Amino acid sequence: MTELRTPAERPVVVTGASSGIGEAAARALAALGHPVVLGARRVEVCERIAGEINAAGHRAHVVPLDLAEDASVVAFAKAAEAAAGPIEVLVSNAGLVQPSEVLTAERDDFERHLAVNALGVRTLVQAIAPGMVERRRGDLVFVTSEVLRAPRPGIAAYVTSKFAVEGMIATLAMELEGTGVRVSTVRPGATFTEMGWDWDPAVTGAVYRDWQRRGLQLHDSLMAPSDVAAAITAAVGAPAGVVFRGIEVEPLAPIVEKEDGR
């Protein structure tokens, strides 16, 4: 059987690493000893995070990345390898989510979501995965969403793009069978991140109430980004010969006190 776990220190790239799940994943993987490349548009924020990682005795690099631009994606992959070495792990986490409805959204709304959430991921995989295939090892970890299990209104373009990228991921997994490269998907539920912070609060409230009415939001508990990062590190650290194909991570409902106080 081909050994999947060498070298011990595996260069990692993380997209969407300037906040939330991406930042948490970069910190967690760096703490495990892997050199990490942080990719995002907000380079100055990534520089601060990388500085903190390096100050803690780990290794982090920063490379600008705009998934909506193929040239940026290709340049990112080349610069990441130059900085950290041949990429052993890709954590594809960056994403766009804006309010939208099928009946009213402009074509551009859907195209922007598809460009970032699906087509940019395709370009990144094409730039990084062939090296993994050549070395006969590697981990491709894709952060998608619970909307694959439970689609919801109010974010139609986002839902569409996530179905598109998961279709691509499923096909990719079949293409990579027998190469030694593992493909994993992490589907987070409600997580406290910056996604959605730029929405109109009135729109946010209306969407959230609609989800509650439909039973799509059963309680108000949110996960920390580090909770989802734990699933990502689990996928990356799976034993040789094993792949964690799909991991769904959900916040635990708050404990309800019974009438007898127990």
Image: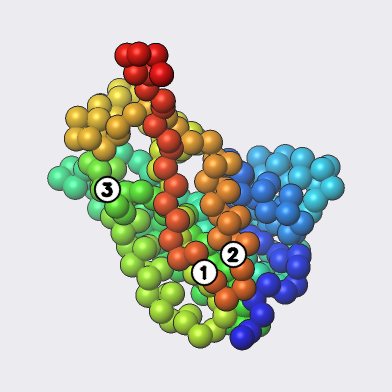
Residue that carries the numbered disc 3 in the rendered image: 150
Q: What's the residue at 30%, 32% (across, down)?
A: 218
In the rendered image, the vertical position of residue 46 relative to residue 177, given as above or below: above
Q: Secondary structure at mark 3?
A: loop
Q: Which residue is mark 2?
A: 238
Q: Compute the Cα span from label 2 to label 1.
A: 6 Å
Q: Earlier in the sequence, mark 1 or mark 3?
A: 3
Nearer to the camera, 63 or 208: 208
What residue did someone put label 1 on?
Answer: 243
* Label 1 – label 3 distance at C-alpha: 24 Å
Label 2 close to label 1 by CB (< 8 Å): yes
Q: Are marks 3 and 2 in contact (CB under 8 Å)?
A: no
Q: Residue at x 38, y 27 (%)?
A: 220
Q: Secondary structure at mark 1?
A: loop
The answer to which of 215 and 97 lies nearer the viewer is: 215
**Residue 250 visible in the snapshot:** yes
Identity, as a three-letter code, of the amino acid under mark 2: Ala
Q: Residue at x 43, y 74 (%)?
A: 173
Q: Are marks 1 and 3 in contact (CB under 8 Å)?
A: no
Label 3 is placed on what type of residue?
Ala
249 left or right of 57? Answer: left
* Badge 2: residue crowd in 10 Å (few <14, some 14–19, many ≥20): some
Where is residue 110 shown, x and y percent of the image?
29, 53
Along the line of sight, which residue is nearer the eye, 181 or 37? 181
